Structures are given as C-alpha cells and as structure tokens.
C-alpha cells in the first residue's frame, strides 16, 4: 500500500478522492489506529462503487481474512451478487458474532446509520484490537426523534474513531481532512480553491462560519447542492 506524503492536495474528482480515502485509511491503520473513519460527505454520492474500491484494497491487504458488513440487507445482498470477483465474506450488522470471525484480520462497515449505533458498538468491541473501518457513516440520519441518551451514546462512540479521511463541500469552499494532515478549511475564489485555515480538531459548522466571516467577510457552512459543481470549482 502506498504511503501518503506531506504534499497531499484537494482531489479534483471523485476517483482521486476515493484513492486518497483508501490510502489515508490504510496509513492510519499502519500507524496504529484500530478504529478508523472515512467519510466522503457528498449529498448525491452512491456509496456502493466506493465501497467496492475499499473492498478491493482490503483484499489486497488482508486476502480473504476480513469481513464486509452492511447495515442494509438489500445492500449486503447486492454486494454478494456484484462482488463475486473479490470473493469476500459479506454480513449484516444484525448478524452479531457471525460478522466478527476469529480468523478475520480487519472489518469494513459500510454506511451505518444512527439506528444501528448500539449494534455497531458491540461489533467493534468483538473486533477488539483488529482494524475496524467505518465508511460513509450516516449516524445523524435519524436525528429527529433520537433521544438525548442515544445522541450522547453516538457522540461518545464516534469519539473513539480516528478520522482518516473526510471531505465535505461547502457553499463557498470545503472542509477536508486526509490523514496524516490536519483538518483544513478551503475557500472557493475566482482563482480556484485556496486554503483558509488548518485546525487540529474537526471544526463545527459554527466554527467554519466564524472562519469565513473573519477571513472573507462571508458565511459558508452549508452543503453544496451538486457534486459536479464542487469538482468543477476544484478543477479551476
């Protein structure tokens, strides 16, 4: 697996972003992280093609001694049909101990939602010190109706993960983290994307708005509506 360098730049397209996310994930694991998160936060993104690329990289790294886990039974069934060339074991979150085999060296969980937080936490505990990667978690999906105790459990659980890769397009820029680099806020200008700030911890939406107001006089904390619009801005 190739190692990342200090000169990583914002990706120009989804393929580059996926390659960055995979490399960052494996580098975080090689550096000792066992709970790793990779999140490409694009509103229109289809997770399955990205999950396939991650699965192929896991095959390269671990052979057949790893497990792909889906929270959605339909997605798991689709992966079983489509990923025949990978010869990978596919399980569902609800399968409990059967999803965490003794011979497995690593685990990849695709798109878990807040509904499965308790089940996922049990799986992570069963995995022990073996790498457990969450790809594109959607743990805020069921915020409405989610009780305070459930939200606190979710936040506590997420705090145990190292974010190896995160990219979120904003109305006037982007929030990006590519391990081992720090979190970066980027600003879209007429000349292209320019780095606005680097911070050690993931900034909140309020933090990002404050940065934009301080440095540009504008406010930008919302999603871009279209994936292609974001990459068009990057490619300038």
Image (spheres, grey):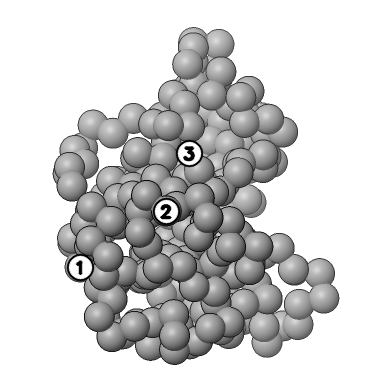
Which comes sooner in the sequence, label 1 or label 2? 1
Left or right of 196: which side holds 225?
A: right
Mark 1, residue position: 32
Which comes sooner in the sequence, label 3 or label 1? 1
Q: Mark 2 packing: few (<14 Cα in 10 Å), some, or many (20+)?
A: few
Label 3–label 1 contact, CB within 8 A: no
Mark 2, residue position: 84
Task: Residue 5: name its quadrant.
Answer: top left
Tell me the tag on residue 185. 3
Identify the residue shown where x is 44% and y is 80%: 99
Residue 180: percent from the left, percent from the top?
A: 26, 50
Q: Mark 1 packing: few (<14 Cα in 10 Å), some, or many (20+)?
A: few
Residue 72: percent from the left, percent from the top?
A: 63, 66
Camera-side mark, 1 or 2: 2
Which comes sooner in the sequence, label 2 or label 3? 2
Identify the residue shown where x is 18% and y is 60%: 30
Residue 234: percent from the left, percent from the top?
A: 49, 21
- State how far apart marks 1 and 2 are (Cα): 31 Å
Residue 209: percent from the left, percent from the top?
A: 63, 42
Camera-side mark, 3 or 1: 1
Identify the residue shown where x is 81% and y is 69%: 144
- State how far apart marks 2 and 3 are (Cα): 39 Å
Identify the residue shown where x is 60% and y is 44%: 46
């Amino acid at each position: 697996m190739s190692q990342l360098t200090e000169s990583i730049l914002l990706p120009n397209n989804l393929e580059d972003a996926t390659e960055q996310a995979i490399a960052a994930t494996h580098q975080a694991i090689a550096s000792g992280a066992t709970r790793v998160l990779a999140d490409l936060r694009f509103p229109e993104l289809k997770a399955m093609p990205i999950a396939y690329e991650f699965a192929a990289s896991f095959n390269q790294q671990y052979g057949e001694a790893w497990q792909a886990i889906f929270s959605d039974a339909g997605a798991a069934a689709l992966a079983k049909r489509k990923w025949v060339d990978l010869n990978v074991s596919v399980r569902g979150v609800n399968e409990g101990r059967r999803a965490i085999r003794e011979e497995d060296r690593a685990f990849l969980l695709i798109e878990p939602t807040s509904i499965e937080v308790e089940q996922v936490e049990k799986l992570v505990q069963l995995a022990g010190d073996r790498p457990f990667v969450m790809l594109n978690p959607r743990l805020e999906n069921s915020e409405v109706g989610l009780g305070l105790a459930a939200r606190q459990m979710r936040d506590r659980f997420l705090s145990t993960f190292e974010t190896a890769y995160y990219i979120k397009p904003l109305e006037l820029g982007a929030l990006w983290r590519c391990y081992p680099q720090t979190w970066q806020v980027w600003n879209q200008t007429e000349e292209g994307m320019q780095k606005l700030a680097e911070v050690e911890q993931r900034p909140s939406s309020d933090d990002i708005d404050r940065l934009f107001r301080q440095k540009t006089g504008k406010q930008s904390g919302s999603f871009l509506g279209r994936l292609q619009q974001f990459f068009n801005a990057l490619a300038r």
